[in-house]
Image: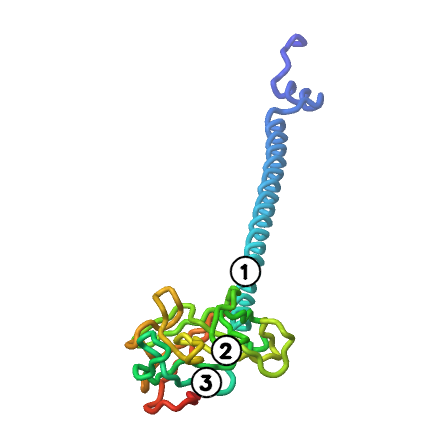
Amino acid sequence: MSDALPSPTASSSKQRRGHLIPRHASIQRWTNDERGITGLETAIILIAFVVVASVFAYTVITAGIYSSQKSNEAVNAAIEEVRSSVRTTGNILAYRGDVDTDGVASSTVDRIPVVVSVSLELRVAINGVPIDVTPPYQLNATNGSLESSGLTNTLVVDYLSQERQLENAAWTVSFTGATDGDFSLEAAERATLTVWLVEYDYDVSSGLYYRLGADADDPFIDDAGGLLGKYKPFTLEISPVRGAPFQVDRLTPQSLNPIINLH
């Protein structure tokens, strides 16, 4: 009959010929779009990793450079400490004197022959930086007695024996050879430091003589038991304001001559 309904197969064919989009094709396109988004996210993550790695690398390099600079500063400071210390040249000499122990200059029966001073020649170590050797004491230009210089010393000399310790002991300085006239010890100069263990005083009637210190406030040995006699060890420690201290250890001989070479 001519009024028969079209078959499902024919209807489907007409739909394909009319270019209708099947449902499964829309799903496929959506799936393709999702892959594009996933690729963009991966790129963003990779860029983030690169940025973080760059920041970390910069931090590590900066820390390494800072650490290297600090190491160099420490090494240079250590070298500076060594260069600014002192050394001795030549022999170390001790001087004997008769020390008055009763406080009466005219009396000589009580005097004891002991080491009264020690001299040593100093130079700057390894051609280092100059050292201030401004002395705390000097010899009086008129009578030759020991007196305060009125100057502030930065170089400190400590004396130590089995019987006594003198912190910031009394010392004088004189230059030998070439000098520019100031108290700055430079590489080409030599300075002789004389450390005084007892007072070197002047009496109008008796002249120059050695005596014990007056009290604990002065930088001298105050009692006869603390004097440096024969066959006694002692130490001098010389400390510049900058640089490592320099230590001298010596032993007095069994016989005290007026001038004793301690080598």
For mark 1, give the secondary structure: helix
Residue 36 is situated, as x and y percent measured from the top left of the image, at 63, 36
Residue denoted by label 1: 70
Residue 92 is situated, as x and y percent measured from the top left of the image, at 46, 85
* Residue 21 in the image: above or below residue 71: above
* Residue 125 in the image: above or below residue 68: below
Labelled pair 1, 2 in contact (Cβ < 8 Å): no
Residue 31 is situated, as x and y percent measured from the top left of the image, at 59, 32
Q: Residue furthest front?
A: 205
Mark 1–mark 3 distance (CA, rounded to whole Å) = 41 Å
For mark 3, give the secondary structure: strand
Mark 1–mark 2 distance (CA, rounded to whole Å) = 52 Å
Give the number of the disc on residue 116: none
Residue denoted by label 3: 92
The quadrant in which the C terminus is found is bottom left
* Residue 78 in the image: above or below residue 122: above
The residue nearer to you, when weighing 35 against 188, is 188
Left or right, residue 26 beside residue 211: right
Labelled pair 1, 3 in contact (Cβ < 8 Å): no
- Where residue 188 sits, quadrant-wise, is bottom right
Crowding at label 3, few (<14), some or many (≥20) Cα neighbours within 10 Å? some
What residue sits 65% from the left and 20% below the top?
10
Residue denoted by label 2: 144
For mark 2, give the secondary structure: loop
Q: Earlier in the sequence, mark 2 or mark 3?
A: 3
- Identify which amino acid the numbered label 1 is placed on: Lys
Mark 2–mark 3 distance (CA, rounded to whole Å) = 22 Å
